[in-house]
Image (spheres, rainbow, N blue to C red):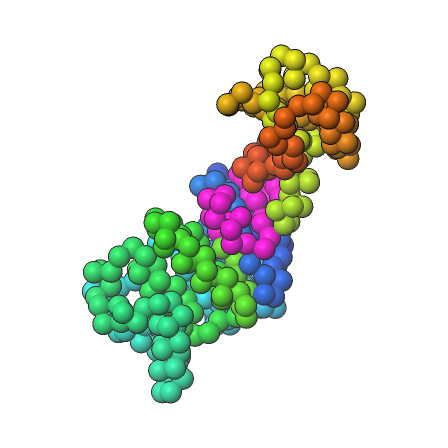
Amino acid sequence: MIKANKLTMHYGPVKALNEVSFEVKRGEIVGLLGPNGAGKSTAMKILTTYLYPTSGTAEVNGLDVLAKPLEVRRVIGYLPEILPLYMDMEVRAYLDFVARARGLRGVTLKNRINAVVDTCGLRPMYRKVIRELSKGYKQRTALAQALVHNPEVIILDEPTSGLDPHQILEIRNLIRELAEDKTVILSTHILQEVQATADRIVIINRGRIVGDGTIEELRNRAKTSERIVVTVEGQREEVERLLSGVEGVKQVVFAGATNGCVSFTLHSPIGRNPWRELNDLVRQKNWKIRELADKPLSLEETFLTLTEKAAEKAINQ
């Protein structure tokens, strides 16, 4: 549904995008993840035909964004980071205006407005002036305008920016519902947001893609060792010494102590998980064990590792 091929964008001497390529399949929720200034919004604006790239190509639903921008706009719904709202209009008048601008008329117009009002939970605010709405309802109104023409592709730029936790959960649920019959691409700099919402993650940093895959695929690509967390009752020095002697353990890192228990993170070579040896040690020493579990990389650790690897590679080139 979406294909970007070597997209490059210059703003004067600044290279916002550097040969960015990725694809989004039909029915997928793909998150563009990266810090502020990474190039996410620039990529969004190219896909929505607001910007022409310096070089490279992009297609939406098989349509070239450079050659057929009007056709592309017909099949996408776009929610930019700065909400495209007319603050002095009522919600109903605004949605009617957007729907008519999209070419909807008659029964189709009425049915689509009713559909997005219900989908976005705007019925209680239907006759209110937009400037009087809360931040959450303004976000919902802006999302409704992106959906009113029933697009096949939905492009959301920072869709939960500035919302409170309750509003964020509501928008997340709405995005998942939309993905049942639409393709969704969203950008965010919030790690938890993309982890909770997206099927696949594309990590952008300094205009380059440094990771593309599911969370598990990215973790496997980023990890440099297997990690096990062990928490037992005992003295730190003795437990640390014995754990360091376990075959397959190459590093033991103290992680804290509480209520007489000491906790360590054990590192071992990739593909070598010494849980059997650890289990034998625990039984041999008759330790009272509180925890023995794998410790996969968090999304934060995955993100930092992949961006650092990409930075090192760029320097070496």
Left or right: 125 in relation to 190:
left
Q: Is residue 161 above or below residue 117?
A: above
Going by the image, does 310 lie left or right of 144?
A: right
- In the picture shown, does residue 123 fall above or below 193? below
Residue 202 on the magenta span? yes
Residue span colored magenta: 187-211
The structure residue drawn at horizontal position 68% and vertical position 14%, both measured from the top left corner, is 241
Q: Of all residues shown, which one is farthest toward the bottom?
A: 107
Viewer-proximal residue, 134 or 147? 134
Give residue 143's position: percent from left, percent from top: 39, 63
On the image, the x and y values in percent for residue 214 come to 63, 50
Q: Who is closer to the viewer here, 230 or 211?
A: 230
Instruction: Give the vertical position of 310 relative to 176 (above or below).
Output: above
Q: Residue at x 34, y 49 (%)?
A: 164
Q: Quadrant of the N terminus?
A: bottom right
Q: Residue at x 50, y 23 (%)?
A: 259
Residue at 73%, 26% in the rendered image: 283
Residue 288 seen in this snapshot: yes
Q: Quadrant of the C terminus?
A: top right
